[in-house]
Image: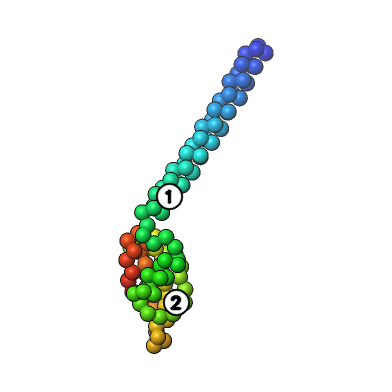
Amino acid sequence: MKTALSIILLSLSLLTVQTATASTVHAVTSMMATSMKANSQQQKLKVHSKEQALQLAKRQYRGKVLKVQSSRVNGNPGYSVKLLSNDGVVFYVKVDAKTGRVSRN
């Protein structure tokens, strides 16, 4: 009876270790896939930083930059740039990071 109980307990212990290992492998695989996807997306972008977005916006639209922040543009990653025109009008420009396209709202 003790031997059977020992075998059952050992089997349960091994099953627990296998389940924990499988969970760990799944978690690591998931993190690696997310990292690879982010890296792949980063390589496809034409605009990689707020500074690049700012330069594109200033090149196309004259004015003082008040703020730059990350945003979604047409479903793509991008940036929203808040500008103050020379005649005192505040306006926003969207920069699509994937295409590099700049548009005024």
Question: Residue beneath label 2, please?
Answer: 65
Determine whether 37 is above or below 13 in the image.
below
Asked which quadrant contains residue 73, the reply is: bottom left
* First in residue order: circle 2 vs circle 1: 1
Query: From this viewpoint, which residue is outermost toward the bottom?
Result: 87
Q: Whole-percent x and y of residue 97? A: 37, 62
Q: Amino acid at mark 2?
A: Val
Q: Is residue 25 left or right of residue 61?
A: right
Q: Whole-percent x and y of residue 85? A: 39, 83
Q: Quadrant of the C terminus?
A: bottom left
Q: Is residue 4 left or right of residue 70?
A: right
Q: Amino acid at mark 1?
A: Asn
Query: Label 2, label 1: how many angstroms apart (C-alpha)?
Result: 29 Å
Determine whether 39 is above or below 11 in the image.
below
Q: Is residue 47 visible in the rendered structure shown here?
A: yes
Mark seen at residue 67: none
Instruction: Identify the element where label 2 is drawn.
Output: strand
Residue in view at x 32 percent, y 61 percent: 99
Q: Is residue 90 visible in the rendered structure shown here?
A: no
Determine whether 75 is above or below 11 in the image.
below
Circle 2 residues within 10 Å: few <14, some 14–19, many ≥20: some
Q: Whole-percent x and y of residue 51? A: 45, 67
Q: Whole-percent x and y of residue 88? A: 41, 86
Determine whether 33 is above or below 68 in the image.
above
Residue in view at x 37 percent, y 80 percent: 62
Residue in view at x 36 percent, y 54 percent: 44
Instruction: Identify the element where label 1 is drawn.
Output: helix
Q: Quadrant of the N terminus?
A: top right
Q: Is residue 90 left or right of residue 4?
A: left
Residue in view at x 67 percent, y 13 percent: 2
Question: Residue beneath label 1, please?
Answer: 39
Q: How many marks?
A: 2
